[in-house]
Image (cartoon, grey):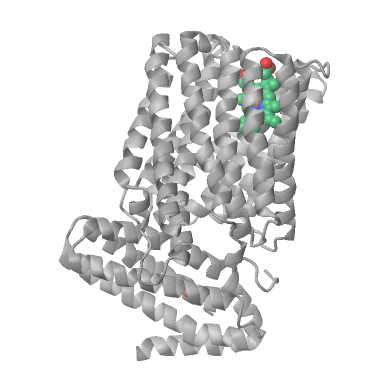
Amino acid sequence: MNAPDSGLSLEQAPPISVPFRFFLSAPLFLLLAALLLLVSGPQVLLSRWTPALLALTHLITLGFLSMIMIGALMQQLPVVAGAPMRRQLLVAWMVHIPLLAGTLMLVSGLLYSQTALLRLAIFPLGLAFSSFLVAAAGSLSASQVHHATTRAMRFAGTSLALAAGLGITLAGTLGGYFNLPLNELVGLHVGWGLLGWVGLLVMGVAYQVVPMFQLTPAYPARLTRWLGGSVFLLLCGWSLAPQLPLPLATWGTSLTAAGLAIGFALFAGTTLYLHKKRRRKLVDVTLRFWRTGMLSLLAAIALWTTAHLTSAIADDPRYPIALGILFMFGFAISVVIGMLYKIVPFLVWLHLQSRLPRDKPAPNMKQIIPDHGSRRHWWMHMATLLLLLGSMAWPQLVYPAGLSLGLASCMLWLNLLAATRLYRQLAR
Amino acid sequence: METISEYLSSDHHCCDDYFATAEVHAAKRDWAAAAASFEQFRSTMTHHFEMEEHILFPAFEQETGMTQGPTQVMRMEHEQMRELFARMAAAVTAQDADEYAGLSETLLILLQQHNLKEENVLYPMSEQAFGSKGEAVLRQMKEMSTVA
Ligand code: HEM
Ligand SMILES: [Fe+2]
Ligand SMILES: [Fe+2]
């Protein structure tokens, strides 16, 4: 706050090509996930450890979610934290291409059980995440802005470092580099990846964008002050608890896991409550995606809680898969898409209106991505979510689910592409 | 005692309400109501911009010596928003609901980002820079309200 120009310079925003390369690549990975679902059929869902499901998971977590989250952070970090990221264009190249290539290698390595590919994938993925994290840390450490959002972003970045580090260790173990207990590592990897990296980032971003897009009251300061930090500490506790002597280890694990469930339930519940209190009465497509996301998050927590009370559910091989569908598709993907439908048209507008002559106004956001396009996508997204959940009971439904996921990803990609082409045309 | 931050932030809040009302009326194509609430929104916003541009920003520039810094960016964003107001007014006159909705969506994000930057950075910085002179600046802005 003492820095003279913290947070107020437009020069800090990177060129539009920086975030857009990430946004335009991501839907293609979702399309690959749909194809994989169609090709492998109901077998994918036999257990969480089928090669096809592990591949599918990383098409989503790395190819889609991390791809977009990193692109959006490279755009927003300098603005939110008020500190520029140095050499943004170089960083964008050093993150985007390796992430793209590394994800494809990892996914095919997992799918075809090719240990050589798994070993190879470590290098591009390691390069992508370390380049991004170093650049982000540089920007955040120069920042004078300290609020709940930048705090949550720091925690999310640390979680990404741990998740990626553990992922690389896992790939190295499968590839024969190390000899480590796979099961325990996978648990930690999933926890830090999904709850830390994805969950904490969504929280931090929500603090800013939910009030901004829907004109809701702010999140209560009592909540934002401690929630991110508590989730982070609970994740640390949950990771270390198994090292305690026996009865304590079990208690520690259960208590910290319950704490995490309560933390995320509070977040989702507060968000839905704020949506109800919003002053902007229109229901836009972002609101629909975010509500879907928060309800899915609550459903995931309810399922997790039920499984802890009923061993029949906990032992069912479909349980972790259903949990994954609710958390990754229902929650994370929905929220990320909801964000894209605001960020992408706004960035196109912002960059265009500074380039166009005064007598030629930039197209407005709804001319850049028309409502009917994004709304149609939301319906297809809902159909996909329901079909995926339905396939837990009727495995044959994976075929229509795959088809609908494929259509939904094409719709997203075409919507983003149309915005990009409009920009190219006018900015010339 | 009310601070500069509190006074201007609650004015932001008030503008948001008019914004939301105008948007709903335009979406329902109730053009008489849309025109009235849009006019209310626009005049409240314009008055707010003037308080900042004529009183707060010059005082800030004088106290800190920064004339090319944050206030310059804020002025530029006011200009961008004024352009959107003009196009929104034209959309109301033309009774074009789609055009209004698109402009309104665009303005919302621009305006909210702008307000966040002021509330999180510029207003607290100003209060710090003004010290005991803050009261006088606040009074001047309020007097401008009664004259207008
Ligand atoms: C450097 C990047 C990454 C690498 C190299 C990597 C690698 C791996 C490997 C090798 C496995 C275990 C496969 C097995 O046990 O056979 C795994 C599991 C998993 N990874 Fe990653 N991963 C990475 C990033 C991520 C991220 C960022 C997330 C989440 C946001 C994620 C989510 C998961 C999940 C959910 C599983 C477990 C699937 C299950 O338990 O059913 N991974 N990962
Ligand atoms: Fe302003
Ligand atoms: Fe203001």
Of all residues, the one furthest to the front in this rendering is: A428
Q: With respect to residue B83, does A115 lie above or below?
A: above
Q: Relative to A424, say whether A326 is above or below.
A: above
The quarter of the picture where the C terminus of chain A appears is bottom left
Q: How many marks?
A: 0
Q: Residue A161's spot in the image, x, y percent? A: 73, 38
Q: Is residue B132 visible?
A: yes
Compare residues A114 and A229 and report the one nearer the observer.
A114
Inspect this view and state whether residue A219 appears: no
Q: Position of residue A225 (x, y in %)?
A: 62, 53
Residue under the point 35% across and 71% down: A359
Residue A348 at x, y percent in the picture: 45, 55
Residue A111 spot, x, y in % from top left: 61, 15
Q: Quadrant of the N terminus of chain A?
A: bottom right
Q: Is residue A34 above or below residue A356?
A: above
Q: Is residue A175 left or right of residue B50?
A: right
Q: Is residue A329 above or below residue B31?
A: above
The image quarter containing residue A108 is top right
Residue at 36% in and 67% down: A360
- In terms of depth relative to the viewer, which is nearer, A426 or B64? A426
Rendered residue at 74%/54% (across/down): A138
Question: Would you identify the image quadrant in which residue A86 lies?
Answer: bottom right
